[in-house]
């Protein structure tokens, strides 16, 4: 990887640099939150967090810990910039997105600071591509104030059990209604579409459910159009933690295992719809 | 119909996960309830709304049909793939040695400009080959494709019972647990006659016979309904599909688990005379109410 050392010859200090032997460890997880064009990137010594928001009601975060990167240097306490995620993903997969080629694409990502572009060096089999992506003024991201002490209900289950459910969601329904309860029906996903309603019940002793901590019965509705993008994260993940707090806010945490067996997390927060009418059952 | 299909959409995964399926009718809330009991104790409950439907009683009798062809579904589906997807009707012409399938060209289309597709299947390829009348019949390709798909998935041969043009053609699939009859309307003679003029020598049929059969149909039609008396100028472009598709198909589904699945697919009968013959018993009720659901028919 000769090019990596060459790029260092530039004397301008980078506030943030990182390198990865397999770019797919980054691109795959970014795809899980790619439902809007723009994303905010936060780099701290812990790692990189990429945030995408929709309609001020939904926030998706992808966390890539510093340990995932072969090299992760940050000169300031935190570095923030906004970037076109579509362009970033296009660049990251410039040598192709499929896992088939045996040689992984290596990545070095550099950022000089405010007002500078994000520079990507991608190398595969001796071919190097340099991409410079304009960064944008960072916008304030939503603070959902989702605090674990306020969590009322929490279920951890294997993603396998939800994948089919989410991919088959009746999209003619405006809402996805989630019921979590210490008593029957324990965990229920409901849609109310043109053709009628559909309920999906998971008993709490199902083998799919790894942890079941429900303290009170909660029924909340979430806009299905907002939650549908989380299917991408679900598809990548091996486990998912579903939590609701006392305000009915929903947190979906996906545990994603990358190609090198390391664990990353993708998180979705979603506001409930305010009025919950008596649902037909 | 669509909603029921969506419940059973991903067949491969259903086969893997579903252990039991319970179909019931909740009359209190007017819902068709389909419950799937899956692996890991997961229960999927679908409450589907449904609508009232008039059941059609097609008048047909396979025993009296002079012509019977039986062939593997594969043979026929291999044959129809050659027709363009947009084609609405095909004509089947049976002769002692072979069966010719060709696309049906409407009257106002200049046959010199239209694309004509024609292919023949030799007698040896059929399992049964019984012909008494050599009338060509024309029927809807779309419905035919549907039933071929069904027959192919069940791996059963299709029997085709048909008479003259204008009489229903019955396509049936038989098994020990399943007997499905698909009754397709065929275009009546007036259309074919005009088409045979276009084609000239292409139709080696006996015109006298045709007209005799035609008159007979007409008589029956007159007896069954008054509406038949006022035959409108025949229109080969079937603007008015007189019968509601969705209701028919729902009926087929509701009896899906029974031994006998009866499914009548409405054809595109060309004129009232013909229609009243085929669906004589329900013509009166298939008026305005039926028209309202027509919109849903198009992609049902």
Image (tube, rainbow, N blue to C red):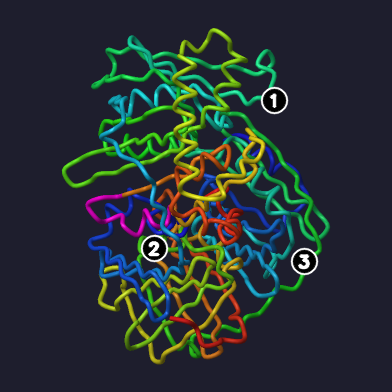
Drawn side of residue B55 relative to residue A2, left or right: left
Q: Is residue A235 left or right of residue A269?
A: left
Mark 1 lies on a secondary structure that is: loop
Whichever of labels 3 and 2 marks the residue nearer the N terminus, that label is 3
Quarter holding the N terminus of chain A is top right
The answer to whether residue A207 is left or right of residue B225 is left
Q: Name the quadrant containing residue A182.
A: bottom left
Mark 1 vs mark 3, CA separation in Å: 65 Å
Read off the magenta span.
B249-261
As drawn, A278 above or below A266:
below
> In the displayed structure, would residue A107 be above or below residue A246?
above
Image coordinates for residue A166, horizontal then vertical, percent: 46, 62
> Relative to the observer, which residue lies in front, B35 or A83?
B35
Mark 1, other Cα within 10 Å: few <14 / some 14–19 / many ≥20: few
Could you tell me which secondary element the residue under label 2 belongs to? loop
Q: Write down the residue under mark 3.
A: A138
User: Does the magenta-highlighted stretch encompass residue A142?
Assistant: no
Q: Which residue corresponds to mark 2?
A: A159
Identify the chain of the residue marked 3, using the numbered disc in the image: A
Label 1 and label 2: CA atoms lie apart by 59 Å
Q: Is B236 in front, or is B159?
A: B236
- What numbered label is drawn on residue B108? 1
Of circles 3 and 2, which is in front? Answer: 2
Q: Are marks 3 and 2 in contact (CB under 8 Å)?
A: no
Res B209 label: none
Q: Residue at x 58, y 49 (%)?
A: A19
């Amino acid at each position: 990887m000769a090019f990596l050392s060459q790029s260092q010859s530039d004397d301008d200090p980078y506030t943030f640099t990182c390198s990865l032997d397999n770019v797919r460890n980054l691109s795959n997880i970014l795809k899980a939150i790619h439902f809007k064009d723009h994303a905010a990137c936060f780099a701290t010594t812990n790692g990189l967090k990429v945030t995408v928001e929709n309609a001020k009601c939904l926030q998706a975060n992808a966390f890539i810990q510093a340990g995932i990167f072969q090299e992760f240097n940050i000169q300031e306490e935190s570095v923030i910039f906004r970037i076109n995620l579509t362009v970033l993903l296009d660049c990251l997969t410039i040598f192709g997105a499929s896992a088939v080629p045996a040689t992984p694409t290596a990545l070095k990502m550099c950022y000089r600071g405010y007002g500078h572009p994000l520079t990507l060096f991608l190398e595969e089999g001796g071919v190097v591509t340099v991409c410079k992506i304009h960064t944008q003024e960072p916008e304030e991201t939503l603070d959902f104030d989702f605090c674990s002490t306020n969590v009322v209900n929490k279920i951890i289950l294997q993603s396998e059990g939800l994948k089919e459910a989410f991919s088959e969601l009746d999209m003619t329904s405006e809402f996805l209604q989630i019921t979590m309860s210490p008593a029957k029906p324990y965990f229920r996903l409901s849609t109310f579409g043109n053709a009628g309603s559909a309920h999906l019940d998971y008993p709490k002793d199902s083998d799919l459910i790894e942890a079941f901590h429900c303290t009170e019965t909660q029924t909340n509705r979430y806009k299905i159009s907002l939650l549908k993008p989380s299917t991408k994260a679900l598809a990548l993940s091996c486990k998912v933690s579903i939590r609701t707090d006392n305000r009915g806010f929903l947190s979906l945490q996906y545990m994603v295992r990358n190609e090198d067996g390391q664990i990353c997390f993708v998180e979705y927060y979603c506001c409930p719809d305010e009025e919950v009418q008596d649902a037909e059952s | 119909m669509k909603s029921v299909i969506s419940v059973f959409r991903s067949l491969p995964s259903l086969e893997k996960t579903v252990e039991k399926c319970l179909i019931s009718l909740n009359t209190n809330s007017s819902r068709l309830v389909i419950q799937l009991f899956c692996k890991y104790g997961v229960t999927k409950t679908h409450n589907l709304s449904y609508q009232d439907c008039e059941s059609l009683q097609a008048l047909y009798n396979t025993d009296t049909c002079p012509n019977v062809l039986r062939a593997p579904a594969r043979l026929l589906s291999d044959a129809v793939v050659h027709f363009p997807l947009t084609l609405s009707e095909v004509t089947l012409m049976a002769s002692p040695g072979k069966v010719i399938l060709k696309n049906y060209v409407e009257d106002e289309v200049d046959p010199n400009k239209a694309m004509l597709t024609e292919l023949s299947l030799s007698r040896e390829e059929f399992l049964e080959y019984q012909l008494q009348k050599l009338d060509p019949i024309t029927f809807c390709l779309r419905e035919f494709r549907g039933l071929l798909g069904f027959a192919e998935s069940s791996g059963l041969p299709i029997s085709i019972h048909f008479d003259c043009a204008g009489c229903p053609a019955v396509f049936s699939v038989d098994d020990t647990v399943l007997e499905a009859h698909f009754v397709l309307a065929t275009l009546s003679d007036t259309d074919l006659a005009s088409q045979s003029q276009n084609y000239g020598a292409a139709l080696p049929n006996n015109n006298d016979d045709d007209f005799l059969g035609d008159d007979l149909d007409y008589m029956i039609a007159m007896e069954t309904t008054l509406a038949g008396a006022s035959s409108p100028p025949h229109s080969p472009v079937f603007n008015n599909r007189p019968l509601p598709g969705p209701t028919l198909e729902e009926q087929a589904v509701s009896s899906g688990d029974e031994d006998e699945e009866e499914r009548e697919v409405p054809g595109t009968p060309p004129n009232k005379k013909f229609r009243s013959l085929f669906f004589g018993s329900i013509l009166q009720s298939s008026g305005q109410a039926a028209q309202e659901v027509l919109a849903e028919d198009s992609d049902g």
